[in-house]
Amino acid sequence: MYFRFTLINLSFIAASLTATAQNNTHSDTLVASTTDSFEDKVFEKVDVEASFPGGDPAWRKFLERNLRGDVAAENGAPFGIYTVWVQFIVDREGKITDVKSLTNNGYGMEKEVERIIKIGPQWQPASQNGRNVKAYRKQPVTFIIEDADLEVTSKNSNVLYIGIDNSITVNCPKIKDKNLRVTISQGSISGDNGNYIARVTSVGRATIEVYNKNKEVGSFSLEVVVLPSSKKIKQ
């Protein structure tokens, strides 16, 4: 078993982000309390974004040095690709507050990302009209748990989209192509010789099960999301 994690660039978010962070409608500001005080607003768009000391490269190094990328595998997560989204606020003093997960992959992944964000140093706060303000930030971290003898990949950025044909490649060197059989936990999958088309129906996750004739040799879990209306997928 192999495990690794990847980091995606930071970006600002509004509090209304969904768990998959795919289709978001933003407003210019978000009020964090009933008062109209400028200091109590939490901004989505600002003149100068909040930043980690040393910028994004230093932030990535901090996560890479401190985040336990093996936590999902240790907690028994199936082979697959899991993206965790954690939202937090950088306040006017640069302190991180209101850390919470936007996803629920489980297996300790969300808790681990929350933990590492909470122990970090103070940030340089965001500013609006020359004044420090509170601002939302979002950090996605992708955990990848791999089997050395089984590789399952989706050409659509390793996610499955509802309502379209998703190209799937299955590579298992120990199985002859004629004996390779593949099923999926939702929707349908068809094809042969390691190349398949999957169609899924429900947001969440889908498990690809791989068989050598009738004997299961492994499985792989992929995220299922709604295709954004503006996104065109090349098959």
Image (cartoon, rainbow, N blue to C red):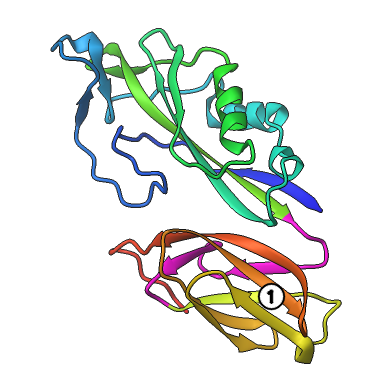
Question: Which stretch did the figure color magenta?
Answer: 146-164
Judged from this view, the residue extending furthest toward the front is 214
Which residue is under mark 1?
170
The residue lying at 19 percent from left, 36 percent from top is 27
**Spot occupied by residue 112 in the image (x, y as percentages of width and height):** 62, 30
Observer-nearest of 77 and 53: 77
Q: Is residue 57 visible?
A: no
Observer-nearest of 198 and 5: 198
Element carrying mark 1: strand
- Classify 202 as above or below 31: below
Instruction: Please give left or right for residue 230 compared with residue 29 in the image.
Output: right
The quarter holding residue 102 reads top left
Observer-nearest of 150 and 26: 150
Mark 1 belongs to which amino acid?
A: Val
Instruction: Please give left or right for residue 111 compared with residue 175 in the image.
Output: left
The residue lying at 41 percent from left, 69 percent from top is 201
- Classify 22 as above or below 120: below
Label 1: how many Cα within 10 Å (few below 14, some 14–19, many 20+): many
